[in-house]
Image (cartoon, grey):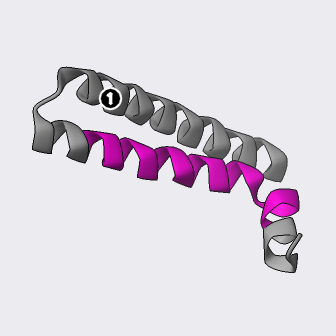
Amino acid sequence: MEKWRKNILEHHLDTTLILFELVLSVIFLLVAYLTGNIYFRGVGVGLVIAWVTSAIAYLYKKKMIKS
């Protein structure tokens, strides 16, 4: 495995997954907007909810670690 990938997986996995959820939600919402497909919109909204929840949990975890 390449060195930069190993670094991301070992030290920044939570941040990487949160950003991945954000990117996927934007992609699904764009596809829903362009095609008018309600199913893609539902998946996009679900991913937005997951992204916000993950981001809040990440920030809470960071705050608790600093305390």
Magenta segment, which residues?
8-29
The relative height of residue 26 versus residue 42 in the rendered view (above or below) is below
Taking the image as shown, residue 45 lies to the left or right of residue 24, namely left
Q: Position of residue 1 (x, y in %)?
A: 89, 69
Taking the image as shown, residue 33 lies to the left or right of residue 7, namely left
The quadrant in which residue 35 appears is top left
| Residue 12, magenta (yes or no) | yes
Taking the image as shown, residue 2 lies to the left or right of residue 26, namely right
Q: Residue at x 23, y 43 (%)?
A: 31
Q: Position of residue 24 (x, y in %)?
A: 43, 46
The relative height of residue 64 versus residue 38 in the rendered view (above or below) is below
Q: Position of residue 61 (x, y in %)?
A: 73, 41
Q: Residue at x 46, y 37 (%)?
A: 52
| Residue 16, magenta (yes or no) | yes
The residue type indicated by label 1 comes to Val
Q: Secondary structure at mark 1?
A: helix
Q: Residue at x 88, y 59 (%)?
A: 10
The outermost residue toward the bottom is: 3
Q: Read off the residue under disc 1.
A: 45
| Majority SS type along the magenta span | helix
Taking the image as shown, residue 23 lies to the left or right of residue 5, namely left
Query: Few, some or many C-alpha atoms within 10 Å of disc 1 (few <14, some 14-19, many ≥20)?
Result: some
Q: Position of residue 14 (x, y in %)?
A: 71, 48
Q: Residue at x 84, y 61 (%)?
A: 11
Question: How many numbered dots are placed on residues in this image?
Answer: 1
The relative height of residue 56 versus residue 46 in the rendered view (above or below) is below
